[in-house]
Image: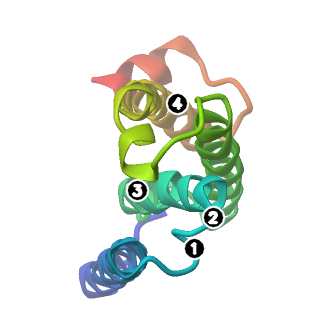
Amino acid sequence: MTKQIPQLAAARLAIGLAQGVLLWWLDDAVEAKRWPATDETLFAALLVPAVFVPAIALAGIGTLRTRTLTLYLGGAFVLCLGLGWYSIFRHVPGPLDRRLGFGWLELNAALAGFFFVLHALVTAADADRRGIASASVYFETAW
């Protein structure tokens, strides 16, 4: 469903502003050494969705139906939250800045690739109004 251009621009601007404020808040918490940065697993669990969920929302707004976008964002949020928590949980104890190094980059790269493919699949299925779209719709959406 397409919306008018000014509405889409305002929604995208609001999403970008909200993401910027959230990332600024998380960065400020690290600099000031206060909550949520004092709880490393919670901080990592919040950081991953703060990066990916707004990007998914920006890509999906205007191309996906509202219900589909809401379910997609909810699932992406839960997945990112869980993987962010697990990525810190499985590492050896140590300072947070060191723990956000090696495994953190691999997680973000894998999630970026995963959501790139998933977004094409969700968009095609939503356009075809079916759970699994036809091959021609997948082809048109991917290209």
Q: Which residue is mark 4?
A: 118
Residue 99 image offset from top left, x and y in percent? 45, 39
**Label 4 – label 1 distance at C-alpha:** 30 Å
Image side of residue 114 versus residue 7, left or right: right
Which sits in the foreground, 109 or 61? 109
Residue 124 image offset from top left, x and y in percent? 52, 33
In primary-sequence order, the first of circles 3 and 2 is 2
> Of discs 2 and 4, which sits in the foreground?
2
Q: Amino acid at mark 4?
A: Leu
Q: Amino acid at mark 2?
A: Asp
**Label 3 – label 2 distance at C-alpha:** 19 Å
Q: Which residue is mark 1?
A: 36
Image position of 143 with respect to 66: above or below: above
Where does the C terminus fall, quadrant-wise?
top left
Residue 90 image offset from top left, x and y in percent? 66, 29
> Of discs 4 and 1, which sits in the foreground?
1
In primary-sequence order, the first of circles 3 and 4 is 3
**Label 1 – label 3 distance at C-alpha:** 16 Å
Instruction: Look at 59% across and 18% down and name the residue there.
Output: 134
Q: Which residue is mark 3?
A: 51
Q: Which residue is mark 2?
A: 39
Residue 127 image offset from top left, x and y in percent? 54, 42
- Image disc number at residue 135: none
Q: Residues within 10 Å of mark 1 (few under 14, many from 20)?
A: some
Q: Amino acid at mark 3?
A: Val
**Label 3 – label 4 distance at C-alpha:** 16 Å
Image position of 105 with respect to 36: above or below: above
**Mark 1, secondary structure of its residue:** loop
> Of discs 3 and 4, which sits in the foreground?
3
